[in-house]
Image (tube, rainbow, N blue to C red):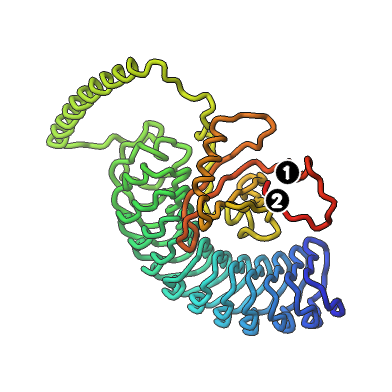
Amino acid sequence: MANCSSLKYMELSFNQFTGVLPTSVANLSSTLQGFDIAGNRICGNLPLGLFDLVNLPRIILQANQITGTIPTEIGKLQKLEELFLDRNRLFGEIPSSIGNLSSLISLQLDDNKLQGSIPSSFGNCHNLLFLGLSRNSLSGSIPKQFFPVSSKLVSVVLSQNHLVGSLPLEIGNLFNLNEFYISYNNLSGNIPGNLGQCSSLEFLFMRSNNIQGAMPMSLISLKGLRQFDLSQNNKSGQIPTYLGKFALEYSNLSFNNFEGEVPTEGVFANVSSISLEGNKRLCGGIPELRLPRCIIDESKKRKLRLVKIVVITISCISGVLILSASLYYWFKKQKRKQSPGSLEMKSFRKLSYQRILKATEGFSTANFLGAGRFRSVYKGTLEEDGAIVAVKVLNLQQRGAEKSLMAECKVLQNIRHRNLVRIMTSCSTIDFQGNDFKALVYEYMPNGNLDKWLHPRSEIHAEPTEQ
């Protein structure tokens, strides 16, 4: 294969190849765009010749039996964007030269036998989005250089190592952080208040450490949190009521030293979505938890009664006013009817920019379907259920784009037809560079578009059209 001078993609994954990687890989094409032999039984060390392919953007060697250390020569691959070496038998330290990989987007080293500390040079990988170092034997503290101001990290997985010390305050620099896994380490200290600056965080797993102190109020900013596991630590104080305001799907606070009244709102209203055992001084909560009643002194009882009287009085007055206003508008606009074509938004799923980015593989050209004057269309696969969608991304730099979007939404609101592609949801947020981002997500329909079938073209290289 070394004679294949024009080879661009080498895809041999999930077969039953055995043996070692030959040193002749250094003779592969200098224009090679992908080297993928994942899911085989390749053994031996990583050949040094592999790191002479300085233009190579993707190395996928996961799920093999590769041994030895990661050579320092890896730092020569400055155009490398994806490096997958997880689920092998690599040992030794992670070389600091990995900080030279300035184009690196995704690095996966999970499930190896790597030792030593996390290199502070990771902070030089300014384009890194996804980092996996779990299930190794890494030790030492998490360096503050790991979280530079310019960081774009979206996913950090450090679980099941031997990390110690407290989380650095610089974690607040990860404004794009969506997933943070540090379970099963030996981390200690308090949860830094700066973690509340990670407003994009959805998954926070800190299970089985030695994290102490009360929950900081600054975490009230994590309104998008979906799953939270703080079990098997030494946290104390009361369970913050703001957790009940979040749209949490799952919360595990078991085996800590929490005390006082358990909230009853949000996730705490569903006994199957929470775990609180091992906190012996908790009380109240919903009846299904079978916790003892909270003891309230007489002064607090009097205040509560007064508050209830005030609330009931205000509620009654407000109710009368609202009822009067409702009757007034009902008589005034009796003939007004709700449009039958209203979009059933409640059934729409929520898609963040980060999930759309994953679904379209970073809006890659391989998923590009077409473009119009105001938007581009990409094919995407949702990670949760594998659903295939078409993502129509608005070009906000084009004048009149937003007006076009509003017109399209207005039409979709009032039209129903079995031959029209159904809109699934929309996304209006900012991307990782802070720019406005707007997109519509449709069901994906294969076999081209209506224009192609009504007006077939004989040209071999027809221009792509918008779906």
Picture residue at 14% right of the left edge, 30% below the top: 306
What element does badge 1 sit on? Answer: loop
Looking at the picture, tell me which residue is in the foreground, 46 or 121.
121
Residue under label 2: 465
Picture residue at 40% right of the left edge, 70% below the top: 165
The numbered mark at residue 449 is 1
Residue 444 appears in which quarter of the rendering? top right
Picture residue at 61% right of the left edge, 49% below the top: 391
Residue 161 lies, with reference to residue 338, above or below; the image says: below
- Does residue 331 appear to the left or right of 310 in the view shown? right
Image location of residue 9, percent across then percent down: 78, 68
Image location of residue 61, percent across then percent down: 71, 69
Image location of residue 100, percent across then percent down: 57, 81
Tell me which numbered mark, 1 or 2, is placed earlier along the sequence: 1
Image location of residue 71, percent across then percent down: 65, 82
Looking at the picture, tell me which residue is in the foreground, 420 or 109.
420
Looking at the picture, tell me which residue is in the foreground, 205 or 219.
219
- Does residue 270 appear to the left or right of 212 in the view shown? right
Looking at the rendered structure, the kind of residue marked 1 is Asn
How many C-alpha atoms fall within 10 Å of the one at disc 2: few (<14), some, or many (≥20)?
some
Looking at the picture, tell me which residue is in the foreground, 310 or 113.
310
Looking at the rendered structure, the kind of residue marked 2 is Thr
The reply to whether residue 314 is in sight is yes
The reply to whether residue 94 is in sight is no
Instruction: Determine whether label 1 and label 2 are within 8 Å by CB.
Output: yes
What element does badge 2 sit on? Answer: loop
User: Which corner quadrant holds the N terminus?
Assistant: bottom right
- Does residue 280 appear to the left or right of 411 in the view shown? left
Residue 3 lies, with reference to residue 16, above or below; the image says: below
Picture residue at 79% right of the left edge, 76% below the top: 20
